[in-house]
Amino acid sequence: MIKNAPFRFSDFESIELTYGTTDSLLNSFDSKSGDYQYLTNDNKLVKDTLKMRDDDLLYLHRKAQELGFWNVDDDMTTKRDADNPGSSIPRYILKFTYKDKSKEVVLDADYEGNPKMKDAAKSTIDHLMTMLAEVKAR
Protein backbone atom coordinates (compact mmCIF):
# COMPACT_ATOMS: atom_id res chain seq x y z
CA MET A 1 0.00 0.00 0.00
CA ILE A 2 2.67 2.53 0.97
CA LYS A 3 4.78 1.80 -2.11
CA ASN A 4 1.82 2.66 -4.33
CA ALA A 5 0.76 5.70 -2.33
CA PRO A 6 0.36 8.89 -4.37
CA PHE A 7 2.96 10.64 -2.22
CA ARG A 8 5.95 8.56 -1.06
CA PHE A 9 8.30 9.64 1.69
CA SER A 10 11.27 8.55 -0.43
CA ASP A 11 10.31 11.42 -2.80
CA PHE A 12 9.75 13.91 0.04
CA GLU A 13 11.43 17.34 -0.18
CA SER A 14 9.78 19.78 2.23
CA ILE A 15 6.82 21.00 4.26
CA GLU A 16 5.82 24.65 4.24
CA LEU A 17 3.25 26.25 6.52
CA THR A 18 2.09 29.85 6.37
CA TYR A 19 -0.61 31.10 8.70
CA GLY A 20 -2.16 34.18 10.24
CA THR A 21 -5.12 36.40 9.55
CA THR A 22 -6.22 36.63 5.93
CA ASP A 23 -4.77 40.14 5.58
CA SER A 24 -1.36 39.34 7.12
CA LEU A 25 0.08 35.84 6.91
CA LEU A 26 3.16 36.63 9.02
CA ASN A 27 3.73 33.22 10.62
CA SER A 28 5.64 30.69 8.53
CA PHE A 29 7.80 27.59 8.58
CA ASP A 30 9.83 25.94 5.82
CA SER A 31 11.39 22.55 6.61
CA LYS A 32 13.89 22.81 3.75
CA SER A 33 15.56 26.00 4.98
CA GLY A 34 14.52 25.66 8.63
CA ASP A 35 13.23 29.24 8.57
CA TYR A 36 10.56 29.78 11.21
CA GLN A 37 8.92 33.07 12.01
CA TYR A 38 5.98 33.78 14.23
CA LEU A 39 4.14 36.65 15.83
CA THR A 40 4.18 36.64 19.65
CA ASN A 41 1.22 37.59 21.85
CA ASP A 42 2.65 41.11 22.18
CA ASN A 43 2.87 41.48 18.36
CA LYS A 44 6.63 41.01 18.00
CA LEU A 45 7.81 39.11 14.96
CA VAL A 46 10.36 36.47 15.99
CA LYS A 47 12.63 34.84 13.41
CA ASP A 48 14.24 31.53 14.28
CA THR A 49 15.74 28.46 12.65
CA LEU A 50 14.31 25.03 13.42
CA LYS A 51 15.77 21.86 11.96
CA MET A 52 13.46 18.88 11.98
CA ARG A 53 14.87 15.38 12.08
CA ASP A 54 14.04 12.89 9.35
CA ASP A 55 11.92 11.01 11.91
CA ASP A 56 9.89 14.17 12.55
CA LEU A 57 9.24 14.63 8.84
CA LEU A 58 8.39 10.94 8.38
CA TYR A 59 5.91 11.20 11.26
CA LEU A 60 4.22 14.23 9.65
CA HIS A 61 4.15 12.53 6.23
CA ARG A 62 2.51 9.44 7.73
CA LYS A 63 0.04 11.53 9.76
CA ALA A 64 -1.00 13.38 6.61
CA GLN A 65 -1.48 10.04 4.88
CA GLU A 66 -3.41 8.57 7.82
CA LEU A 67 -5.71 11.60 8.13
CA GLY A 68 -6.46 11.70 4.39
CA PHE A 69 -4.72 15.01 3.69
CA TRP A 70 -3.99 13.97 0.08
CA ASN A 71 -7.75 13.75 -0.60
CA VAL A 72 -8.88 17.13 0.74
CA ASP A 73 -9.78 20.03 -1.52
CA ASP A 74 -6.96 22.43 -2.34
CA ASP A 75 -9.15 25.49 -1.75
CA MET A 76 -11.02 25.41 1.54
CA THR A 77 -11.57 29.14 1.85
CA THR A 78 -14.74 31.03 2.70
CA LYS A 79 -16.10 33.43 0.09
CA ARG A 80 -15.57 37.03 1.21
CA ASP A 81 -17.41 40.23 0.35
CA ALA A 82 -17.80 43.76 1.73
CA ASP A 83 -20.18 42.55 4.46
CA ASN A 84 -17.87 39.67 5.44
CA PRO A 85 -14.24 40.72 4.80
CA GLY A 86 -12.86 38.04 7.13
CA SER A 87 -9.73 40.05 7.91
CA SER A 88 -9.53 38.63 11.44
CA ILE A 89 -10.21 35.00 10.47
CA PRO A 90 -7.17 32.68 10.68
CA ARG A 91 -5.96 31.23 7.37
CA TYR A 92 -3.55 28.33 6.96
CA ILE A 93 -1.59 27.39 3.85
CA LEU A 94 0.05 23.97 4.12
CA LYS A 95 2.21 22.54 1.36
CA PHE A 96 3.92 19.16 1.15
CA THR A 97 6.49 19.09 -1.67
CA TYR A 98 7.78 15.92 -3.31
CA LYS A 99 10.12 15.36 -6.27
CA ASP A 100 7.47 15.25 -8.98
CA LYS A 101 4.43 16.82 -7.34
CA SER A 102 3.11 18.72 -4.37
CA LYS A 103 -0.07 19.14 -2.37
CA GLU A 104 -1.06 22.61 -1.17
CA VAL A 105 -4.18 23.32 0.85
CA VAL A 106 -5.51 26.75 1.81
CA LEU A 107 -7.86 26.55 4.80
CA ASP A 108 -9.89 29.28 6.49
CA ALA A 109 -10.76 28.60 10.14
CA ASP A 110 -14.42 29.43 9.42
CA TYR A 111 -14.67 27.13 6.36
CA GLU A 112 -18.18 25.67 6.22
CA GLY A 113 -17.63 22.97 3.62
CA ASN A 114 -17.31 19.23 4.16
CA PRO A 115 -16.50 18.79 7.89
CA LYS A 116 -14.49 15.59 7.31
CA MET A 117 -12.23 17.36 4.83
CA LYS A 118 -11.87 20.36 7.13
CA ASP A 119 -11.01 18.08 10.06
CA ALA A 120 -8.40 16.19 8.01
CA ALA A 121 -6.70 19.42 6.93
CA LYS A 122 -6.91 21.05 10.37
CA SER A 123 -5.64 17.91 12.14
CA THR A 124 -2.65 17.73 9.80
CA ILE A 125 -1.89 21.39 10.54
CA ASP A 126 -2.32 20.79 14.28
CA HIS A 127 0.16 17.89 14.18
CA LEU A 128 2.68 20.12 12.40
CA MET A 129 2.17 22.93 14.94
CA THR A 130 2.68 20.45 17.80
CA MET A 131 5.83 19.13 16.14
CA LEU A 132 7.16 22.70 15.75
CA ALA A 133 6.65 23.29 19.48
CA GLU A 134 8.45 20.03 20.29
CA VAL A 135 11.39 20.83 18.00
CA LYS A 136 11.64 24.35 19.44
CA ALA A 137 11.71 22.90 22.98
CA ARG A 138 14.69 20.61 22.19
Image (spheres, rainbow, N blue to C red):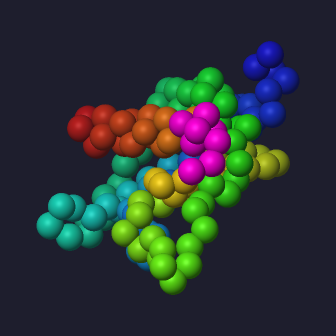
Q: Nearer the viewer, residue 14 or 5?
A: 5
The spot of residue 106 in percent (x, y) is 60, 57
Q: Is 1 placed above or below 109 here?
A: above
The spot of residue 22 in percent (x, y) is 46, 70
Residue 7 visible? The answer is yes
Task: Tell me the quarter of the image containing the C terminus.
Answer: top left
Q: Residue at x 14, y 67 (%)?
A: 42
Q: Nearer the viewer, residue 32 or 7?
A: 7
Q: Which residues are magenta?
A: 112-119
Q: Nearer the viewer, residue 90 or 33?
A: 90
Q: Residue at x 44, y 35 (%)?
A: 127
Q: Is 129 placed above or below 55 here?
A: below
Q: Quadrant of residue 21?
A: bottom left
Q: Is 42 placed above or below 2 here?
A: below
The stretch drawn in magenta includes residue 118: yes
The stretch drawn in magenta includes residue 74: no
In screen coordinates, is 80 left or right of 102?
Answer: left
Q: Quadrant of residue 27?
A: bottom left
Q: Is 67 placed above or below 17 here?
A: above
In screen coordinates, is 50 left or right of 92?
Answer: left
Task: Tell me the quarter of the image containing the N terminus.
Answer: top right
Q: Residue at x 58, y 38 (%)?
A: 115
Q: Quadrant of residue 20?
A: bottom left
Q: Main secondary structure of the magenta part?
A: helix
Q: Residue at x 47, y 31 (%)?
A: 56
Residue that lies at the very extreme toward the front in this rendered image: 83
